[in-house]
Image (spheres, helix red, strand yellow):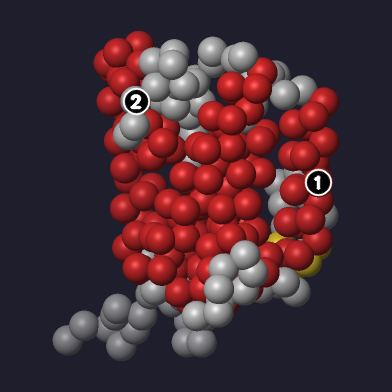
Amino acid sequence: MPPADCGATRPFGTPRMPAMPPITQALLLINVAAFCIDFFLGPWFTQAFALWPLGDGFLPWQVLSYSFLHGSVGHLFFNMLGLWMFGSELERVWGQKRYLQFYFASVLVAAATQLLVNWLLGSGNPTVGASGGLFGLLLAFGMTFPNRIIMPLFPPIPMKAKYFVAIFGALELALGFYSPSGGVAHFAHLGGMLGGFLMIRYWRGQSPFGRR
């Protein structure tokens, strides 16, 4: 006969971490797979799927495909960490369809914003990364759970989500004007937040959208 405690892997009443929701999990896996493919194929893959400025290698599908590419392991890690932290919770609240609509609305508006900024600055640099979608999720998290206490990696100070979002948004705006062509797409991040904000306004039937 097996011991009486056989199979007791955790104490009674210990909270279990919920499983990662399917869309968040799929996005994370696709991003990791795209990073690996880009690593082996190199410049050709970046040329085809990064977001290039209009008239300088731009192709229509790049407004989505750029969000699956990343420039380094660190870039990928922090974006996927944020996707897991904020996206998982929102997907559980919204459901898969609405979550996916929101994420790609943020990605598309981020792409449009970056294309506009590149055109105004005459920049020929490509844009990659899921940061546009992530910043949209960050805004939504702050609007959905404004008083949730979170601990950012930097600075490691616990704060309410609404303050965290406000600080990050203000910081991105300041950095965008201070260093518009410094290698980080700050205005794409702001565009992702704008896309997320507009999507929430659309769901609520608020201006600039008609009553729904």
Q: Quadrant of the N terminus?
A: bottom left
Provide residue 29's location: percent of width, then percent of height.
33, 45
Residue at 59% of width from left, 22% of height from top? 119
The circle on residue 170 is: 1
Which secondary structure lies at badge 1?
Answer: helix
Judging by the rendered image, the residue that carries numbered circle 2 is 59
Residue at 47% x, 87% y: name it.
Answer: 12
Residue placed most toward the observer, 208 or 181: 208
Q: Earlier in the sequence, mark 1 or mark 2?
A: 2
Q: Is residue 126 above or below residue 197?
A: above
Q: How many marks?
A: 2
Looking at this rendering, what residue extends furthest in the left direction?
1
> Amino acid type of disc 2?
Leu
Query: Dot 2 surroundings within 10 Å: few (below 14), some, or many (20 or more)?
Result: some
Does residue 184 appear anywhere in the picture?
Answer: yes
Query: In terms of depth relative to the viewer, which is nearer, 45 or 119?
Result: 119
Q: Look at the image and tell me whether residue 141 can be seen.
A: no
Quarter residue 49 falls in: top left
- Residue situated furthest front in the rendering: 210
Q: CA distance from mark 1 to mark 2?
A: 32 Å
Tags 1 and 2 in contact by the CB under 8 Å rule? no
Decide if residue 37 is on the left or right side of residue 104.
left
Is disc 2 placed on a helix, strand or loop? Answer: loop
Q: On the image, which quarter does residue 50 sit in?
A: top left
Residue, x 55% and y 79% (percent of image)? Answer: 211
Residue 201 falls left or right of residue 181 = left
Is the residue 98 above or below the residue 2 in the image?
above
